[in-house]
Amino acid sequence: MSEHEKQPGESRTAGEIRQQPGTWPEVARTVAAARADIDRLLGDALVDPRTRIVLTGAGTSAYIGEVVAPDLARHLGRPIEPIATTDIVADPGSVADDRPVLLVSFARSGDSPESAAAAELLQRLAPALHHIVITCNPAGALARRWADAKNAVVVALPDRLNDRGFAMTSSFTGMTLAALLALGLEVDVDAAARAAEDVLGTAASRAEAVAAADPARLVYLGSGAFKGLAREAALKCLELTAGAVVAVADTPLGFRHGPKSILDDRTVAIVFPSGDPYTRRYDDDIARELVEALGPERVLVIGSDEWPIPGTAHLPDSVRAIVAAIPAQSIALACSLAHGLTPDNPFPGGEVNRVVRGVVIHEFPTPAEG
């Protein structure tokens, strides 16, 4: 058992948070092994300048698309649309049009009903579909469906990224990294892993200090790639605390337009600052404003002196986000434990499930059927 795997008496979730730096080189090797197939599919898909690039998933998997889209759009020089599977399934007519689609699907298990349905709907409605499946479960329904399809490539990540805990942690950062590499962004994986190791050294104690403040509300703020991370961080807190701690996410600029109403004397705010000097000015502005409203003890800036993320200044925000995910995951875990919950199963009554249940996929009528 490696030093980052589950230790006796601790939750799987804790071990899956700690294992992340060690999994990232494995992710890079997995994508490299599929490089020829990925490049063939990308060549077929992107030769047409009209092809839409759609990144999809549900919940945490949807937020992967939001994290990687800004840097990948700059890298590829074309728009990228993160659209959740839940949006595609509920209103496919608003997504499919007369353009071909390069669909990148993210799925921990691949067994959520919307994962399969979203791809099938675009296969049916788009004039052409090119599909990359990035999953942690080669035995899942999504991977099995597309494994032998001529218009698809399945990238199955190492088994230990298929988190056994309730909430996605290492599966989130692993699939995020895989997406960046698959679509051609150059990533200094070793630097990211070293930074994550440094962050892990103090993550648990810093997170416990946040939980000890007994926050009733957590606010996560970030722009660009960090907007997606902020949404994921808020979801992680809601999941692992079974809703006992209300968590919301926004951008620093958007937060002032009404959502700022959530602030009270039991709120802790966390800001994920951008590495871009222009964008960072807005992050710094909101951090100062929050300190005035809440006091310095209730405002955290991830990447500042109070919670440093060393060795990442040269990395794009989407890569810095996978390192910054570790503080967010650690805070959610610490708050879960502080509320006396079991992080691996915060909903013992089954109100919310690791793989979503209860979804009925309804037949979408063809235009002729009305």
Image: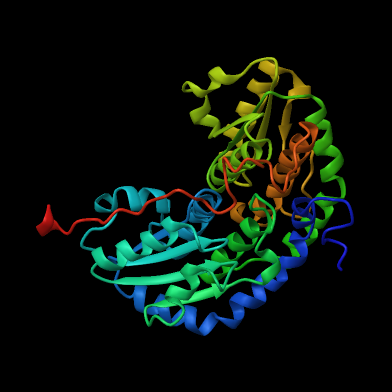
Percent from the top left, x then y, of residue 343? 73, 44
Across the whole image, how many numbered discs are drawn on residues? Answer: 0
Measured along the vertical axis of the image, is residue 96 above or below residue 290?
Answer: below
Q: Please provide percent x and percent y for residue 259.
A: 51, 23
Q: Give the side of residue 33 with respect to residue 120, left or right.
A: right
- Above or below for 289 versus 309: above
Front one among 171 and 286: 171
Is 248 left, or right, of 70 in this rendering? right
* Front residue of this view, candidates 122 and 130: 122
Location of the N terminus by quadrant is: bottom right
Of residue 128 and residue 313, the one placed in the foreground of this image is 128
Determine which quarter of the picture holds residue 122. Answer: bottom left
Percent across and percent down for residue 258 are 48, 21
Can I make out residue 46 in this image? no
Q: Nearer the viewer, residue 311 or 336?
A: 336
Q: Look at 65% across and 22% down and name the residue there.
A: 290
Q: Residue at coordinates 43% horizontally, 74% vertically from top-left? A: 145
317 sits left or right of 362 in the view: right
Residue at image position (48%, 57%) is 112
> In the current view of this chain or complex, which residue is farthest to the left?
368
Where is residue 319? Give x, y as percent. 64, 57
Q: Is residue 39 above or below residue 87?
A: below
Q: What scheme was used to colour the molecule? A: rainbow
Q: Would residue 173 be visible to someone looking at this image?
A: yes
Residue located 73% across and 32% down the image: 300
